[in-house]
Amino acid sequence: MNAPAVTGPAWDLSQEYESVGDPALENDLKALTELLDQIEGLNGHLGDDGDVPTAQSIAKLSEEATRLLSNVSTYTHCLLSVDSQDDAAQKLGGRLQNFSKRCGDLFEPLSQFIDDASEGIIEDYLSDPDVAPSAFLVRHSRARRHENLTLDEESLVNGLSQDGIHAWGRLYDQLAGSLQCEVQRGNEVETMGLAQAAGLMTSADDTLRQNAWRGINAAWEAHEEACAASLNSIAGWRLEMCKQRSRHQPVHFLDAPVHMNRISRETLDTLIAVAEEAKPLAQKAALLQARAYGKDGFGPWDLRAPAPVLESGGENAIEFNDAVAVISESYGSVDGAMSDFVRMMIDNRWVEGTVGPRKAPGAYCTGFAKSRTPRVYSTYTGGQSDVITLAHELGHALHSWVMRDLPDSQTSYGMSLAETASTFGETLVRDNLLARATTNQQKLDILWEEMSAFTAFLLNIPTRFEFEKKFYEARAERPLRPEELKDMMSSAWESWYGASLAEADPLFWANKLHFYISGLSFYNFPYLFGYLFSLGVYAQRASEGGGFYERYVALLRDTGRMTAEDLAEKHLGVNLKQPEFWKGTIDSLATRVDAFERLLDDIADV
């Protein structure tokens, strides 16, 4: 295979471990084992009423153990991302599964102690300076203490779930990983995996996208009974747990998702209502995208289509160093410290951007818990989308960097706030690229991505939420048949996309992994929240003047120690339970939809 014309650098992981066989790595696992042994010994005394010192000791040991396990796990994941067939890394990953399971078992008694203890005992527990930083996590967890079962019952649920709800999730994963589909490609029919076929749906070829979509759906339709059984069982398990946890007060199936995202049900209801009100604008954006392809409406196979290529010429590859320069300049428009951060990431070789046959798809930001240093993973090939993806992941890295001096218990944040810095950084770079664009193709490439994001978050995500919510409501009565699930899914598509979609995607419930994640439900609305929240922060930048960066960093640092509502009130002076903030953000996006329409008019006049 010929080397790509444009690529990015390889990252340097040696600052953590030289290799899988590095003695430092084995020493960390040995230390982890010793910590877990100590926790196991202390757990036997935790049941003593009011044994606060034991609980405090376990908390400190657990934090240290988590740091070590996380460090080795991150290293392993990084190796496998670059080379999915790395035998040594795969074996190390297998060893880590045992450590993860043991941590889960040994950490549960402390969780129960924290939730069940009286308020006086909790005050004593938090009086230790080393434990005090976890106050928010403790209080937030105790907000759902009424749902707790007994320790024995929780242990039983945890044990049964491995061959219960999680088994159904694994079944789906195994099915998705092994299914093959047939796709008409030119004059030939090719047999391929679902991931490969899904990749074809980003092609500029209309026919190929549609053929890939139909091939994927045909493969899933042959297994719709198994998918329906899995989906019904996963939801049935959760609904039964809601019943069991309703001994003191009713527990709704949305209670766990909103709590995990550190928002209230009232905020979620407001968010969805505002999205509903914004449907005409989002549908207009979708219709404009269809117009760019000469269509009256997009098919479901078009939702990941790239910007059309104009006759005037396509996009030129952007060298990696030029991309870094653009990102650094864009970040620096907020504050020089942000530009310096981008350069530091590159100089320290903390960014992976090579092209390789065994690399995992996608991009992400991760970090090493011991050194508190971030790493960005991507595959850079010089497209405008690659530049924006890099800017997005560097935003995640900046978020963790400004929190690096905080206690471990204050560095994790809900998914609802996870996209704050990443979307902010992405928007900075997109606006910069748009401002310097000189051709219609360059402008189209940037505005197309903006419209794709806008319609994905304001139409596609609510479609998923509506389907899942109605499904859970219906599943409370009985399991649903595949045809009923198809009808429910089609209804959700039609409700949100309206005339902007040429036809619904009735099997989306079967081919969307997010519905089958056994560890969490409603993996949808946090994306809408994060998108609008970040753009709301971005919109306030102009009014803040020179003091914006300091306030922005302060906001990021607080994401791990307060709810989203308290964060917004403190740093933005807005009430997320009311619609004004969300509407203001969407209003600011209306000008971008208008700009896209004007560009299409200009192109049509050429």
Image: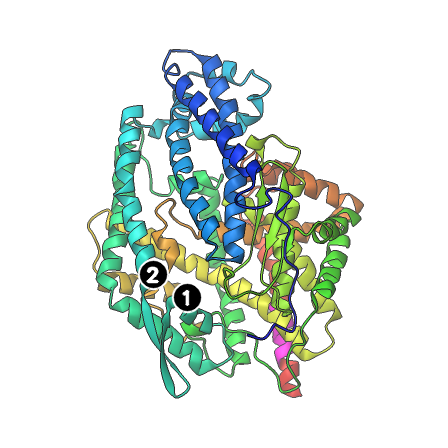
Q: Is there CB contact under 8 Å for labels 1 and 2?
A: no
Q: Residue 565 location in percent, x, y?
A: 55, 39
Q: Disc number at residue 241? A: none
Quarter of the figure with residue 351: bottom right
Q: Disc number at residue 176? A: 2
Instruction: Tell me if residue 355 comes above or below residue 569 in the rendering.
Output: below
Q: Residue 11 location in percent, x, y?
A: 63, 54
Amino acid type, label 1? Ala
For label 2, the crowd category at 10 Å Cα-Cα, with few meaning under 14, some 14 to 19 and many 20 or more, is some
Residue at 67% x, 63% y is 430
Does residue 396 appear in this view?
no
Q: Which residue is mark 1?
A: 195
User: Which quarter of the rendering shows the N terminus?
Assistant: bottom right
Q: CA distance from mark 1 to mark 2?
A: 9 Å
Instruction: Tell me if residue 577 comes above or below residue 211 in the rendering.
Output: above
Amino acid type, label 2? Ala
